[in-house]
Structure formats: C-alpha cells, structure tokens
Image (tube, grey):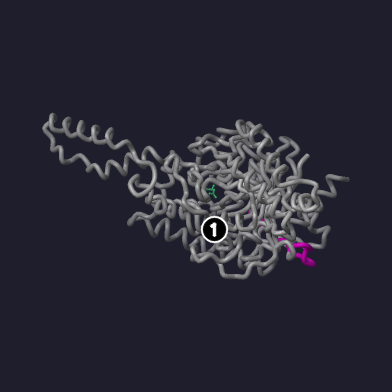
Amino acid sequence: MQPTGIRETQRLIAEGALTAEQITGHFLETIERDNPELNAFTTIAGTQAMQQARETDQQFWDRKAGRLAGAVIGIKEAIVERGRVCTAGSKMLAGFESVYDATAVQRLRDEGAILIGRLNMDEFAMGSSTENSAFGITRNPADKTKVPGGSSGGSAAAVAAGMCHATLGSDTGGSVRQPASLCGVVGLKPTYGRISRHGLIAYASSFDCIGPLTHSVEDAALLLSVLAGHDHSDATSSRKPVPDYLAESETLPQGLRVGLPVEYFGDGLDPEVKALVMQQVEALKAAGAVPVPLSLPHTPYAVATYYILATAEASSNLARYDGIRYGHRTDRAQMMEALANEKKMLQKAGQDPASVESALIRLYKQSRTEGFGPEVKRRIMLGTYVLSAGYYDAYYGKAQRIRRLIQQDFLSAFEHCDVILSPTSPTTAFGIGEKTDDPLQMYLSDIYTISANLAGIPALSLPAGTHPADGLPVGVQLMAPHFREDLLFAAGRQLEQHQATTTRA
Ligand SMILES: NC(=O)C[C@H](N)C(=O)O
C-alpha cells in the first residue's frame, strides 16, 4: 500500500523509504488500470511526470526540495497548462494547446509538484455531475453506477481512486465541494481572490475560484499556502499576506462558536445525511466548541440568484468563442455551399436572395451550434435573456440586490459565530442519467454550496462518514468569514482526528 497523503509521502522520501519515481510509477499504474472505466483523466502525462519525478529525487538528494516536492497533482481541464491540450470539457476547445501556465499551475511547478495529467469536467464547468463533458462521463469510484458530482468530477474521482495525491478544481457554485462530498475527499473553495484566476478558463468571473481537492485537510492547508497570494495578472487577486496555513490550523481555537443555520437542515435533506452531519457537531462540541443556532434568512433565494447571475456572466464570457478569433470553426466549404443553395432556392421561389444572412454571421452561428453542448447553450440563452434591455432590472438587477442581502446574512451571522457548519450536499451521489432530463433538479444539488460563492467566503467540504443505506460518502461543509481559511482547517483537522480515533476504536 502506497501513501496517499503529500506530507506522509514527503516524510518517506526524506527518510529514504520511498522515491518520487516509485510513487509516481504507482499512481500511473493505478491510472492505467482504473481510468478506462472511471474516465477521470482526459490526458495522462506519464513520460513528463516520470521525468519530473527523477528530478525531484535528485532535489531531495541535493536538499533543494520545494514545499511540494514529491506531490503528484492532476489539473482540471479548465485550468491551462503550458504545452497541454486544455478543453474545459468542450468540443469548442478540442485540440487547443495552451502556450502558458495558469498562475496556480506555475506556483505548483515552482514548489516542485509533479503534474500527472488533466481531468474531466462538465463543459465550461456548467453542471453538477460531470455528465456534460464533450469527452464522456466520469464515474464515481465508490459506485460506478453513480455520478462523481461536478463540475470538477474528474478532479474528485482521481483523488478518491488513489490516482494522485491531489488535484486542482474550480468552484463557481460548488464545483469543488459538491464532487468532493460525493466522492469522499476534501475540497476547498477559498475566499474569492485568494488564489489567482489567471489561466482559469472563465465561466462566471465574479464567482470563479480555483481550489484544491485532497485526501486530508492537512494537504489542503499545505496546497493553499502555495497557491494563495497576489498576482499582477489578476486584478481581483488579494494583496493580503499569506499565512502558513498548516501552522495556523494546528489547534482548535478555544470555545470555537459553530453556527448551525436552520435553513440548511430543513426539507429536502436526507435524514441519514443530517444525522452524520450532526455527529460532526457533537465531535466539535467534545473538543470544546459551542454550537450556535442561527438563521441565514435569504438562503431560499440563493439557487435562483446564482443561476441568473452566473448565466449572465457566462453569456458574456462565452461570446469570445466565435470560431474566428477563438474556438471550433465550422467547415467553411460546406457552409458556403449551403448558403449558395439557399440563395438558389430563394431565387427559384421568386424571393430576394439577399435576405440570406451573410457568410460571417452564418460562420458564427454554425461554429457555435456545433461547438457548444446543450447545457452551455441553455445557459447562454438564459444569460442573454436576463441581460436583455426589457428584462435587465427585473432579473439581473434584482439578483444583484439579493446577492448583497445574502452576503449581509453571512456578515451578520459571523457576529455570533466563528464558523458555520452544514451538509455539503442534500443527498449522496445520484445515479448516472438520473437528473440529466431535469435541469432544475440538477441545479438543486448545489443548494448548500452556492451561497458561499454568492458571498465570496471560503468553504471546505470534508468526509463525514458513509451513508448507512447506500454506503456512499457523505460530506460536511464548514464556512468562515473572508480570509479565515485557517479556521476551516483548524475545525476540519479536529474532525479528521476525531474520525481517525473513532474508526480505529
Ligand atoms: N461550476 C459550478 O460551480 C457548478 C454549478 N453546478 C454550475 O453548474 O454552475
């Protein structure tokens, strides 16, 4: 059995009990064996990873190892990596090779991480099940008939299946935390602006965050220490100093007040999920924390608000894929022939052939029709509608105002508590195909994760045990005030320790 934690691996390499080459080889064998069925990885960078591993071993030997030396990490398709195909799960970007590294990827490289490949996702991060990828669905390693969650389903499945130490995902409305919960791993959405978005293919820019998925809270803290910090290429990245999250989260602050929002424990929550989440509250209580019942009154509007604002931003961000400057381009010869035929038909019918649209307009339309999948098209249409002149105030303007009220709910709540605890997802992983015909049901699986994105606050999902009926992983979510990731890690580590002792006992 090989170690799956970064810190543990580093200890073993430093002691000479393991080499980076061995651990990378082990992960590659696991990928080779299990990826054909799971489809977590879209690209496997075996040769380069082994080369990097050999360099890492030399660095350990020379005592020049970086903070992530020996850490084998996979990257979500939405985050660009120099020299690799970066598709964001879309046919629109099939074959698109990036000429630069996202800042987050560059930071991993600078600290010696070994980059092992690229991970499947819902197209342009639009989805909660990884069933919307142009490159096939990803399966949940815990039960291959179930979805892994989404949109970072490949990133969560790869960690859960032991194919790497950690992965990068992105979280616009729960896309790191919900799949982490459904696959039984740790997932962090940091404060908006804590990690640079430079090189993250844009979906909804006022929400998009890059975040790590790991086997342990400790590894998530280590990764955030490396990934966080200001970047001159992203004007929204924060200049706040980056703490040593590992050191800052070693002990649980005395008398930590844990907020329990009534709106997160009501209708629609599976009772067994609720019971496991409440066990986490008991574990924190036993460590001296104090539960504080509270209300976040605007929660019922969160899903609607998010799906108005995110689709509006997406319709604008995705306008760049026009087939000329960027993205898939339709076959021009075929298109010209079709246009010529249409003109002939009109002439025959005695109508004006000039009424046929121009070749340029047709090229845009045809390229976008072919390049985007159905969910992306739905969101572009929704987003364009809510931004249109006659409806702007009724939808977009109103949603912006409700977003402010949701932020205000959290600011008020944090006057009475230090962290907020809730389920991450109302149910365990659902069946493949179960929600694909019902977009509203799919959107509702983000019910507990979306508010943190609306408010810009950090949130962590970690395993809370397995559901007694289906044996699938259940996640618990912790949320904290802006830039207080240290509190999430401190509470998360406490829960992990508790789980380790109770499962051992
Ligand atoms: N991207 C995300 O964070 C996932 C969310 N379910 C969405 O489709 O927008």
- The residue that disc 1 covers is 103
Q: Is residue 342 left or right of residue 154?
A: left
Q: Say if residue 267 shows up in the picture.
A: no
Range of magenta residues: 249-263
Q: Is residue 250 magenta?
A: yes
Q: Is residue 16 left or right of residue 105?
A: right
Q: Is residue 399 magenta?
A: no
**Which image quarter holds the N terminus?**
top right
Q: Any atom of ligand 1 within 8 Å of the CB at mark 1?
A: no
Q: Amino acid at mark 1?
A: Thr
**Which image quarter holds the C terminus?**
top right
> Helix or strand or loop: what does disc 1 sit on?
helix
Relative depth, front residue between 184 and 104:
104
| Residue 30 position within the rendered picture, expressed as x and y whole percent measured from the top left | 68, 36
Q: Say if residue 22 shows up in the picture.
A: yes
Relative depth, front residue between 97 and 296:
97
| Residue 4 position within the rendered picture, expressed as x and y whole percent measured from the top left | 73, 45
As drawn, 111 above or below 464: below
| Residue 462 position within the rendered picture, expressed as x and y whole percent measured from the top left | 70, 50
- Quadrant in the rendering for residue 352: top left
Which residue corresponds to the image point at 52% horizontal and 34% vertical from the top-left? 136
